[in-house]
Amino acid sequence: AQSVAQPEDQVNVAEGNPLTVKCTYSVSGNPYLFWYVQYPNRGLQFLLKYITGDNLVKGSYGFEAEFNKSQTSFHLKKPSALVSDSALYFCAVREKSGGYNKLIFGAGTRLAVHP
Amino acid sequence: NAGVTQTPKFQVLKTGQSMTLQCAQDMNHEYMSWYRQDPGMGLRLIHYSVGAGITDQGEVPNGYNVSRSTTEDFPLRLLSAAPSQTSVYFCASSYWTGTGENEKLFFGSGTQLSVL
């Protein structure tokens, strides 16, 4: 079965500093990887996805993610954090089951950006 | 467009009671799904559907039923509520392209359920 792991429960960063939220994956075959963000009392919102091609994927709100096959990682990054980026971030991997696809989510990482 | 609408936003049940969580989308999405979110466990898939009349089980289907009679609606039924079902429930939908590229999910705002 496909899986993703988010090794940090929480990441703290000062506003203006670069941020990284880590994700590692375990898949058979080529990975289809995603990042979603959840703001307080809201549903998840799609940020970006990696299917194939360039290892650096750009997404919404200035976020990007770097796919590293040798390290089986898909870390989320942003060059300059904003207080408004504070939220819960989920990494996910696509799993094919019975001919249909479904997303398997990690446990989530809470990002806290301090002024 | 309203997107994905879930009702109710909050619900308290007693053990053994039954109820239905409603989910509706107005984007003509073929694919709809239910997840539960528990602290430290991320989101776990309960049931999903790829079109009217077609449903399948996810990772944690026990204690839940679904049906899909229309494209727009995908209700989740708790048959006999248990404290272990206390959670936040999210409905999500997406386009179904036929090639399996259905991974950009649109989520509702969630239903917070407490079972006493």
Image (spheres, coloured by chain):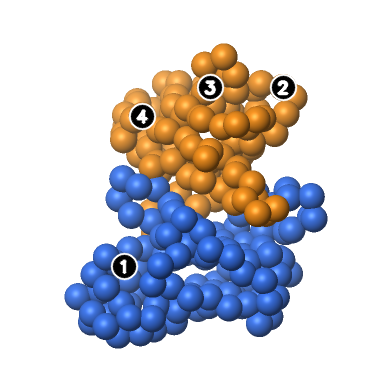
**Residue at the disc numbered 1:** B85
**Three-letter amino acid code at disc 1?**
Gln
Estimate the spatial distance between the alpha carbons at disc 2 and disc 4, rounded to whole Å.
25 Å
The image quadrant of residue A13 is top left
Asked if badges 3 and 1 are on one and the same chain, I answer no
**Residue at the disc numbered 4:** A7
Q: Earlier in the sequence, mark 2 or mark 3?
A: 2
Chain letter for the part of the structure drawn in blue? B
Mark seen at residue B30: none
Is B18 left or right of B83, judged from the image as shown? right
* Rendered shade, chain A: orange
Estimate the spatial distance between the alpha carbons at disc 3 and disc 4, rounded to whole Å.
13 Å
Q: Is residue A76 visible?
A: no
Give how far across and how far down residue B42 sits, in percent.
39, 48
Q: Chain of mark 1?
A: B
Q: Is residue A6 above or below residue B97?
A: above
Asked if badges 2 and 4 are on one and the same chain, I answer yes
Q: Secondary structure at mark 4?
A: loop
Q: Chain of mark 3?
A: A
Give how far across and how far down residue A36 sits, in percent.
52, 44
For the point 65% across and 54% down, the residue is: A98
- Dot 2, crowdedness within 10 Å: few (<14), some or many (≥20)? few
Farthest residue, direction front = A98
Estimate the spatial distance between the alpha carbons at disc 2 and disc 1, rounded to whole Å.
41 Å
Farthest residue, direction top = A70
